[in-house]
Image: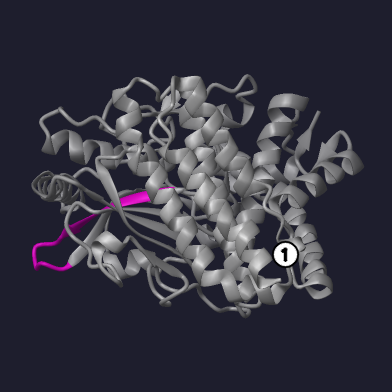
Amino acid sequence: MAYEFDDLLLGDFAHMRDLAEQQPRDAEDLLNNLKEIYRAIYFADFARYSVDQVRDAAPRLQRNIVELRLHVRSQIPKWAAQGLITRPVQSALRDCFRASRYGGDLIGEIALGHPRLAPGQATFAGFGGGEPNLLMNDAFGPGPPAFEPGDVILQRGMIHNSAAIARIGDVDSQFSHVGIVALDKQGAPVVVEALIETGGSITPLNQNLGHNLGRAVLFRHKDSALAARASELIYDYVGKSLEPGGRPIPYDFTMSLAHYDTLFCAKLIRLAYDLASSGAVKLPPHKTLLNMKNRDFLSRIGVDATETFAPGDLELATDFDVVAEWRDFRVTSELRIKDLIMTKLFEWMESHGYRFRPDLAIGLISVGGRISTKISKRAQELVASITGGIVPPNMSGRAIGAVAMLHKTAEPIYRELEKLEDETIRNTGRQLHPREVLAELERIRNRMGRRIGYLSK
């Protein structure tokens, strides 16, 4: 039986690596290879094997998954030089990366017995908790990673709004935020970032990594001198705005790349490397499209761009190496379900004509949220408990209402799926596969009909 498991499941990785190494004849050939890799990962059926078999093979499987992802990523420059990185190929690459992470999460959760955070318990600090949470690129040592100026940290928070940011473009991502490592004037590591709540910010590294994260990837530019310049210049740029008499840099809700007087998280990284290279490096090499027909939600939160730099676009920026990947297995199931909920909510808006319909309560939240930005912190925290995050001072009442509707629509669905998954784990020892979650979400839509929370036809 063990031989059968190794032969059927572990042997699949050798086949997938062979597909990645094949010299494609053209972009269509490459696309088909990537789709086959994706299908092999996505449709792997762990129910064919005992929980003990998956648990015993987990370390090998995890290593194979990360090595496959790194190997596929290493081929991108070669394919780009051949003119093969078409838009469909970009989407297929991202699909492979996403599916492989979910595959790794499923295996890790089974191996660890489906751990959960206790009430009031926080996640591990980013890149903490040791193995198997941390997966190092062998080229950068056994770990934990040593952070260097110019390193870029791709992150995923826990709230529904984070899932929405990860899912808002034309390709589903698993990341919602990004920041750049720098050294402050005392030589201590900090993260320069653009936060929705405060705009341009400088945060101690330990505080940034301890901020309720569920997933993170550490990227390092191949040109260390360029990276160091980028970190120094962006630290000075944001630092001056925070000095007494300085002008704080507002958060950019438009998601436009056209100017730098306002910043969102990924645009700050773009600015850092733009400044350091005197305009020669324009991130990202492949942008996220915001080309949906139903732009109701986007217009409510203030997005007017049709293409942007989403945090997950760094996955295709191969001037950066992946140093390490990390996730807290106590929350990966929650992240996955929230991701899939947002995938379906946006799909329903696009394909079935659902739109958010505010009521009196949302109107009060919208007004109260705007007022709370000008009064006490306690009032802000009260609104945050409804919207899922602290309300920034330059966020419109309409956007506050949209975020509140999103949160209040998604949360009951999440609780229903969480309960179903807990029952599945008790009965089978396995969690819900993403395929099962998506199918259950469609059953929920069919059951609820024309009104799903604040979404209505």
Callout 1 secondary element? loop
- The residue to which callout 1 is attached is 431
Q: Which residues are magenta?
A: 177-188
- How many residues crowd mark 1 within 10 Å: few (<14), some (14–19), many (20+)? many
Q: State the image quarter where residue 298 is shown.
A: top right
Where 338 falls versus 184 (above or below)?
A: above
- In this rendering, position of residue 40 left or right of residue 67: right
Residue 420, position as x, y percentages in the image: 81, 63
Give the residue displayed 56% in from the left and 70% down from the top.
Answer: 58
Magenta stretch encompasses residue 39: no
Q: State the image quarter where residue 223 is shown.
A: top left
Residue 136, position as x, y percentages in the image: 35, 64
Give the residue displayed 48% in from the left and 36% down from the top.
Answer: 93
Pick whichever, 395 or 93, lies toward us.
Answer: 93
Tell me if I can see residue 123 in this picture. yes
Residue 353, position as x, y percentages in the image: 75, 25
Farthest right residue in view: 447
- In this rendering, position of residue 423 left or right of residue 376: right
Give the residue displayed 53% in from the left and 60% down from the top.
Answer: 379
Give the residue displayed 30% in from the left and 31% down from the top.
Answer: 78
- In this rendering, position of residue 14 left or right of residue 448: left
Give the quarter of the figure containing the N terminus: bottom right
Give the quarter of the figure containing the C terminus: top right
Residue 57, position as x, y percentages in the image: 58, 71
Q: State the image quarter where residue 418 is shown.
A: bottom right
Pick whichever, 329 or 232, lies toward us.
Answer: 329
Where 409 falls versus 429 (above or below)?
A: above
Tell me if I can see residue 197 in this picture. no
Looking at numbered disc 1 in the image, what kind of residue is underneath it?
A: Gln
